């Protein structure tokens, strides 16, 4: 009977027979077992040569960052190019830049999870890890910006014998609460999603060290019905908690500027403008790191498909259009307000000494992403990767234009001054990319970069030919 059933095509079988003998085929003819074996093999196999080649420059840049931080602490923040009136310059520019990079991970994981977007499952793990590493890079700058880094703990509202309390009306303190809460919830969200896959690596481990390491992190996960029920509820609650954080964190960061009276900053459009820009830059960074990863691990193209890339490009196009609208509205409101200081601030941005930064921002964030209206460019991986570098650069230019350019021209001409970065500014910024790269390389080497159990759950739904004979 078994031989006779095997000789017939799947379409000729009864529904009961199909349910018994149907193989668990998924998208691109991959089986459930293949997903677990391949994603786990990235962690289990011998470290490839390319990994060491990529890690070495990242570690060297991280060492440069460490040297710059040590030099700054031992010498003082005067080694930065900050001056009067440009008290915020590359330090806060880089802080806001890295915070923005970290928004895509939580958006992909939380908001798309709550809206039941199945395509998020192949990219959410790497995007969440990117969030954590970006926030770590961002947190370096405010701690150093205070000048006496050993006193930075006073930013936290902890009882102290000196009776020193924070100014809770200051947006700078709101940043402390917003960013620390965002990082804490992101870590919990990321780690909770890792637990089932860590248990898989524990069960596959061939050495005692790996079994102990992954077993400890797996927290005794056995995959029982009761555990899955509690897991899904915890993940849902964390997603619900993370969703307002996506909107609130960069809104609070924008309050650093919007609550001031400085021309060019005193505007109500900053919160939605900053949030859209953060999502815009964050998705560009996700594609920047995922496309090379898929090029190196070629079978990942069956998990991170062109459809995923296409959808992320549409998000970049949409949020980039919002950012472009915000730029135009800033110019319009400066003109419509009839405030000579506002008009002068935006005229100076566009045609002053920093004109190159302003027009680079406009081109990278508004003009370049428009090419994603064409499907060919959304589905051609090389073009996607090239175009994504424009938002990556453009979002840094945007923060520089908002901060350094605005501060260099205040109300009084006698207080005007130019900003020029020092070698410490430049190498600290480059060093944060080394830290980011080092952390991400360690992540893909020792932890599963694809969420195996979620991919197994949703890919059969995406395959219209599931169960048919190929």
Image (cartoon, rainbow, N blue to C red):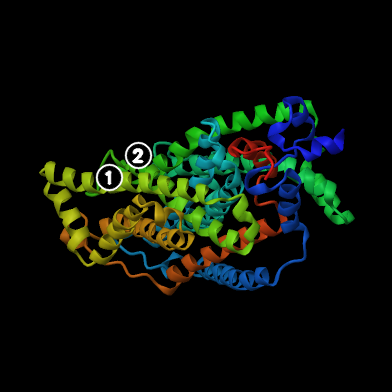
Q: Mark 2 points at which residue?
A: 272
Q: Which SS class for mark 1?
A: helix
> Which of the image's four quarters has the C terminus?
top right
Tell me which corner region of the image, top left, top right, bottom left or bottom right, holds residue 415. Answer: bottom left
| Left or right of residue 429: residue 85 | left
Q: Mark 1 points at which residue?
A: 326
Whole-angstrom CA distance, mark 1 to mark 2, is 9 Å
Q: Position of residue 140 (x, y in %)?
A: 52, 57
Q: Residues within 10 Å of mark 1 (few under 14, many from 20)?
A: some
Q: Where is residue 227 in the image (x, y as percent from the top left)?
A: 77, 29
Q: Where is residue 370 in the image (x, y as percent from the top left)?
A: 32, 53
Q: Residue furthest right?
A: 208
Residue that appears at 46% across and 61% down: 385
Q: Which SS class for mark 2?
A: helix
| Residue 334 seen | yes
Residue that appears at 87% across and 33% down: 1
| Residue 222 seen | no
Choose the circle earlier in sequence order: 1 or 2.
2
């Amino acid at each position: 009977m078994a031989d006779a059933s095997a000789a017939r095509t799947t379409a000729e079988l009864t529904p009961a027979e199909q349910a018994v003998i149907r193989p668990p085929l998924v998208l691109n003819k991959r089986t459930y077992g293949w997903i677990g074996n391949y994603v786990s093999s990235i962690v289990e196999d011998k470290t490839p040569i390319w990994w060491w080649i990529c890690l070495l420059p990242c570690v060297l840049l991280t060492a440069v960052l460490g040297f710059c931080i040590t030099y700054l602490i031992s010498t003082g923040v005067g080694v930065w190019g900050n001056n009067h009136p440009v008290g915020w310059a590359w330090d806060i520019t880089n802080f806001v830049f890295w915070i923005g990079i970290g928004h895509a991970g939580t958006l992909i994981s939380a908001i798309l999870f709550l809206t039941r977007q199945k395509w998020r499952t192949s990219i959410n793990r790497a995007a969440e890890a990117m969030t954590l590493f970006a926030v770590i890079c961002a947190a370096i700058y405010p701690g150093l910006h205070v000048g006496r880094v050993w006193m930075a703990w006073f930013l936290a509202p902890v009882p102290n014998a000196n009776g020193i309390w924070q100014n809770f009306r200051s947006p700078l303190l709101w940043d402390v609460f917003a960013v620390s809460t965002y990082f804490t919830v992101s870590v919990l969200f990321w780690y909770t999603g890792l637990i089932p896959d860590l248990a898989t690596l524990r069960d596959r481990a061939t050495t005692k060290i790996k079994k102990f390491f992954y077993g400890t992190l797996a927290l005794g996960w056995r995959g029982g019905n009761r555990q899955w029920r509690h897991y899904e509820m915890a993940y849902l609650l964390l997603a619900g908690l993370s969703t307002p954080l996506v909107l609130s964190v960069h809104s609070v960061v924008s309050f650093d500027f919007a609550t001031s009276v400085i021309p060019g900053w005193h505007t109500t459009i900053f919160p939605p403008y900053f949030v859209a820009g953060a999502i815009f830059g964050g998705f560009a960074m996700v594609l920047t790191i995922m496309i090379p990863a898929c090029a190196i691990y070629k079978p990942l193209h069956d998990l991170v498909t062109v459809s995923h890339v296409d959808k992320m490009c549409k998000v970049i196009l949409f949020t980039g259009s919002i950012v472009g609208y915000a730029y135009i509205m800033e110019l319009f409101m400066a003109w419509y307000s009839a405030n000579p200081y506002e008009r002068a601030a935006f005229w100076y941005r566009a045609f002053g000494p920093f004109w190159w930064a302003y027009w680079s921002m406009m081109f990278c964030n508004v003009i370049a992403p428009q090419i994603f209206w064409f499907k060919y460019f959304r589905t051609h991986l090389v073009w996607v990767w090239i175009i994504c570098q424009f938002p990556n650069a453009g979002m840094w230019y945007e923060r520089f234009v908002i901060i350094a350019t605005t501060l260099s021209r205040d109300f009084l001409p006698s207080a005007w001054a130019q900003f020029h970065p020092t070698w410490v500014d430049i190498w600290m910024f480059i060093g944060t990319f080394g830290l980011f790269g080092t952390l991400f390389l360690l992540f893909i080497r020792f932890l599963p970069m694809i969420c195996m159990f979620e991919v197994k759950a949703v890919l059969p739904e995406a395959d219209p030919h599931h169960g048919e004979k190929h």
